[in-house]
Amino acid sequence: MQMHLEKEIIPSPLNYIGGKYKLLPQILPLFPEISDTFIDLFCGGCNVGINVNADRVILNDTDGNLQNLYNTFKNMDKDVLLKMIEDIIEKYGLSRSDIHGYEHYGCESGKGLGEYNKQPYLKLREDFNEHKNLDYYHYAILYVLIVYSFNNQIRFNSNGKFNLPVGKRDYNTKMQKKLSDFIDRLKEDNFVITNTDFEVFSLDGYGENDFIYADPPYLITCATYNEQGGWNEDKERALYKFLDKANEQGIRFALSNVLRSKGKENAILLKWLEDNPQYRAISLDYNYSNSNYQTKDRSSGSEEVLIVNY
């Protein structure tokens, strides 16, 4: 197997729930050499797809807001976009701790900037949710919302409205570097952004030199991306059928999931593994440290695995 460590690993500018950034040192070395296309089927924050080595990388997700945000990053002139982001922050009177520090805003670094930013953030959120023109400016506003939101996350309610409260952080130097590095990487020619449900994602033309990475919502864990019932047992079974079809075509795949979590177990996944002994479940350290994983009491945590067909 090829060690995928020659490319600098960069983090996503989004703190996406279930993001695999801290697991990359465990996951990437398990991937085989990919000479053609790498398909990140549920790309989310793109922590995996943006860091793999392949001639072509498809970043796919069903979240249209997410994909339009990535298209904005990829297609806009970087300097113009960064200026637009700074202008939005200035227009709404949000904090810039990198320029003025915390004391300027009457805040302490330990408590964060939420108290100062709350009202301008709520105004920004309201304007975004009422903004009808889905242009680059709209998605620049979305990025600013994410930066100033709770834990830098992205979440929409059932009516399509961004609904996270204000967070403690702002557009600091760390956030700026994450965004800059991510934009530079995304502008490379080999990245393709798509917005397709996996159930209609065509496998025509793919084969043994291609690779699918699937990191779906986890059926037995609760997360913001699954609040609206977007993932269920039918979707779970449909994904396994999709991967079985890929396997029949000779396409290699890796699936991230959890076998058990906090007393629950994914019976559908366990049955699928039992019925397909050709697939391997490789245990990952969900605590993202390499110490004594085999001796931990897993009943209170999660058994995170990477399931592969090679």
Image (cartoon, rainbow, N blue to C red):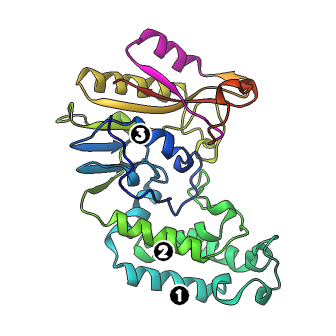
Residues packed near mark 1 inside 10 Å, few (<14), some (14 to 19) or many (20 plus): few
Q: Which residue is mark 2?
A: 140
Q: Which residues are magenta?
A: 266-287
Pointer 3 residue: 29
Q: Residue at x 46, y 86 (%)?
A: 83
Which one is in front, 228 or 50?
50
Between 56 and 83, the one lying in front of the other is 56
Total number of numbered discs in the rendering:
3
**For residue 271: magenta?**
yes
Residue 226 vs 178, above or below: the answer is above
Measured as percent of width and height from the top left, residue 172 is found at 61, 77
Closer mark to the observer between disc 2 and disc 3: 3
Picture residue at 58% right of the left edge, 71% below the top: 174
Q: Quadrant of residue 252?
A: top left
Q: Is residue 241 above or below residue 149?
A: above
Q: What kind of element bears circle 2?
A: helix
Camera sees residue 95: no
Q: Judge whether residue 150 can be spotted in this image.
A: yes
Give the CA distance from mark 2 to mark 3. Answer: 35 Å
Task: Determine which quarter of the picture holds residue 73.
Answer: bottom left
In the rendering, at what x and y percent does residue 108 appear? 82, 77
Residue at the disc numbered 1: 87
The kind of residue on which mark 1 rests is Asp
Residue at 30% from the left image edge and 43% from the top image edge: 38
